[in-house]
């Protein structure tokens, strides 16, 4: 009898458990699993608009021979290689500075650094385009101090357009990563530093050989999330270039190219889905590296 009661109770909790998670599973299936499956099917078709025909690997051949795709992939990789290390390093330095108990107005500084993360994207884009226009405050300041002899075409020169995108991303998301580092630093036992100080370890040594190793999980997390965010870069480029990825496709990213293929030009849903799986593949590889690194750390 007791065994029967336990079995009935187990079935009761199993059924209620599934009923509890059923809405979440339904939403995930509707808004995540179905789009993934649908895009995979679409990647096997080619054509314009709704006039699709099965092409098998035809989109892969087109992908291989598409110079615009390779330009977008190159730009995305460049943003990743340059911007992620800068953002992670700056976030760690700012967190270390704000963690200093002797720093006055640390709360104000923390709010100022984090504020761009929650600022309106439209206002932030308008502000940057105004600051970096030919007659904007940045060019006028650089001219006034004699650093440049003529205004820089931040939005018209391919090289400086990339620099502007990197500056904008760093300014917007460094504060987000800084919060994670600051929280981790504030949870480190101060007695560890006191013991190292008594042993004669200099401040740079305490930071390099104590702080950095204890921050490895947070460094890993912020690096992976920043990398994934950079590979999916869209908002800044779209707002600064009005969706063109200019000048001369110098700021075109994979996400913006997918958007253009789907909405701006004559819709090519199958080819856009194929390009999207390039990002999926890159994200999947990085996720595997994240789990592998976490397993090695344990």
Image (cartoon, grey):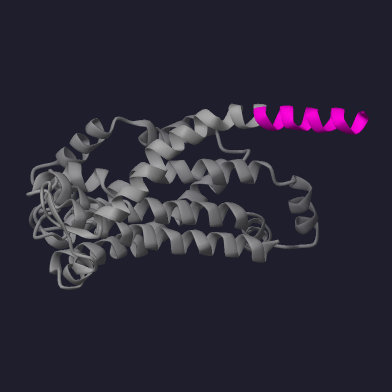
Percent of width and height locating residue 134: 8, 47
Among the 4 quarters of the image, the one containing residue 117: top left
The image shows residue 126, relative to residue 253, as above or below, that is above
Percent of width and height locating residue 289: 52, 64
Magenta segment:
1-15
Question: What main secondary structure does the magenta stretch of the protein show?
Answer: helix
Locate the N terminus by quadrant. Answer: top right
Percent of width and height locating residue 183: 60, 41
Residue drawn at 33 percent across, 31 percent down: 119
Count the numbered circles shown.
Answer: 0
Locate the C terminus by quadrant. Answer: bottom right
Decide if residue 206 is on the left or right side of residue 134: right
Asked if residue 107 lies in the magenta stretch, the reply is no
Residue drawn at 58 percent across, 51 percent down: 218
Residue drawn at 24 percent across, 60 percent down: 44
Asked if residue 183 can be seen in this view, the reply is yes
Q: Nearer the viewer, residue 247 or 108?
A: 247
Asked if residue 133 can be seen in this view, the reply is no
Asked if residue 4 lies in the magenta stretch, the reply is yes
Decide if residue 74 is on the left or right side of residue 245: right
């Amino acid at each position: 009898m007791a065994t029967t009661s336990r079995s009935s109770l187990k079935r009761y909790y199993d059924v209620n458990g599934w009923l509890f998670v059923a809405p979440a599973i339904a939403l995930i299936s509707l808004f995540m699993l179905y789009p993934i499956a649908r895009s995979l099917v679409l990647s096997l078709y080619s054509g314009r608009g709704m006039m699709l025909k099965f092409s098998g690997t035809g989109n892969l051949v087109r992908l291989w021979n598409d110079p615009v795709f390779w330009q977008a992939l190159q730009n995305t990789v460049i943003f990743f290689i340059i911007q992620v290390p800068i953002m992670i390093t700056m976030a760690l330095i700012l967190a270390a500075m704000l963690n200093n108990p002797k720093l006055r107005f640390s709360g104000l500084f923390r709010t100022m650094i984090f504020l761009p993360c929650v600022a309106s994207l439209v206002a932030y884009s308008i502000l940057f385009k105004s600051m970096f226009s030919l007659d904007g405050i940045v060019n006028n300041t650089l001219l006034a101090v004699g650093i440049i002899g003529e205004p820089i075409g931040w939005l018209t020169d391919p090289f400086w357009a990339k620099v502007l995108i990197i500056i904008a991303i760093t300014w917007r998301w460094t504060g987000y990563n800084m919060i994670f580092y600051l929280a981790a630093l504030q949870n480190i036992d101060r007695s560890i530093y006191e013991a190292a100080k008594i042993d004669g370890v200099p401040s740079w040594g305490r930071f390099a050989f104590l702080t950095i190793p204890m921050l490895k999980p947070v460094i890993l997390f912020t690096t992976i999330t920043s990398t994934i965010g950079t590979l999916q870069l869209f908002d800044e480029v779209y707002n600064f270039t009005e969706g063109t990825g200019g000048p001369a496709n110098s700021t075109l990213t994979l996400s913006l190219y997918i958007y253009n293929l789907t909405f701006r030009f004559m819709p090519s849903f199958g080819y856009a889905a194929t390009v999207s799986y390039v990002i999926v593949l890159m994200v999947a590889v990085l996720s595997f590296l994240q789990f592998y690194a976490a397993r090695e750390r344990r």
